[in-house]
Amino acid sequence: MNKKPVAILISGRGSNMSALIEATRDRDYPVEIVGVISNRADAKGLGIAAAAGIETKVIAPKDHPGKEALDAALDEALRAMGAEIVCLAGYMRLLTPGFVEKWAGRIINIHPSLLPLFKGLETHRRAIEAGMRVHGCTVHFVTAEMDDGPIIAQAVVPVLPADGEDDLTRRVLAVEHQLYPLALKLVAEGKARMTGGRTVFSGSFNGSGSLVAPIAGEEAFDIESLARMTP
Ligand code: GRF
């Protein structure tokens, strides 16, 4: 099988990185992880990647005179690894427009909200404060604007009345780990492409099922159970 070489950029824990590495254990998954790069030497994910036998590299701001130089080093390292797609997985730096331009359509990110809502940080707290009844995560192509590129895939979870920030963080993170491998597969297979500022899909997709929240008691979160409850 012809596997797409993919590199992952992280800054910390690396749980999404781990989910992507895990997905590649399936021999039919169309991706090989060729390297993991962090801007921080203390990123926990680096150890996890190394233990999985993946090449790791630290490209830190303190070793480069500016943003352009840092991103030039990043570009060089990605090319040396043979990466054709780049996944941002909790990479906490804004990439320079020049870098993003070079990798246009080949760099994707996961963000813990239903974009275009809640760009930036503290998305779960802001979703609770806004009184959202659903929340989720988004995988999108990266453009020069933060958390702004064409959307590839989204996953939705309920926000329950008793939820605190930690509950919601946990619930969203669990679906992030499912969504990111699915979205990367679409991109690696060429089934989701960035064209003219939009995501264009090829292939057939199933759109059944819906999420309604909240529904009182033990009812499942779906539109059929809501219909049964409505007089
Ligand atoms: C995730 O919530 C991701 O959506 C966001 O940063 C967090 C990274 O977590 N971009 P991890 O390092 O993947 O565990």
Image (cartoon, rainbow, N blue to C red):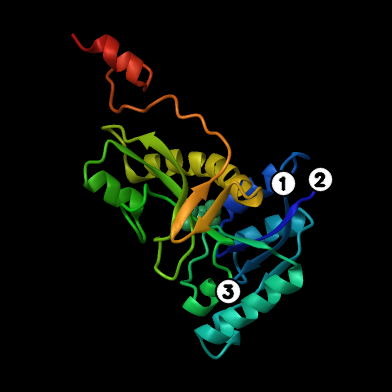
Instruction: Judge whether 164 appears above or below 75 on screen.
Output: above
Confirm whether residue 231 shows in the render: yes
Cα separation, mark 3 vs mark 2, equals: 27 Å
Q: Secondary structure at mark 2?
A: loop
Label whose residue precedes the other's in the sequence (1 or 3):
1
Count of marks placed on residues: 3
- Residue at image mark 1: 30
Q: Is residue 191 left or right of residue 56?
A: left
Of the numbered discs in the image, which one, if any, rests on residue 6? Answer: none
Q: Please tell me which residue is depicted at 26% across the width and 32% down the height of the picture.
A: 161
Asked where in the image residue 70 lies, by quadrant, the reply is bottom right
Label whose residue precedes the other's in the sequence (2 or 1):
2
Q: Please tell me which residue is depicted at 68% across the width and 43% down the height of the picture.
A: 23
Of the numbered discs in the image, which one, if any, rests on residue 102? Answer: 3
Q: CB of residue at label 3: within 8 Å of ligand 1?
A: no
The disc labelled 2 sits on which kind of residue? Met
Image spot of residue 83 (x, y percent): 70, 65
Q: CB of residue at label 2: within 8 Å of ligand 1?
A: no
Q: Secondary structure at mark 3?
A: helix
Image spot of residue 193 (x, y percent): 55, 54
Q: Secondary structure at mark 1?
A: loop
Question: Is there a contact, CB below 8 Å, between mark 2 and mark 1?
Answer: yes
The disc labelled 3 sits on which kind of residue? Lys
Mark 1, residues whose alpha carbon is within 10 Å: few (<14), some, or many (≥20)?
some
- Residue at image mark 2: 1
The disc labelled 1 sits on which kind of residue? Pro
Asked where in the image residue 64 lies, by quadrant, the reply is bottom right
Confirm whether residue 15 shows in the render: no
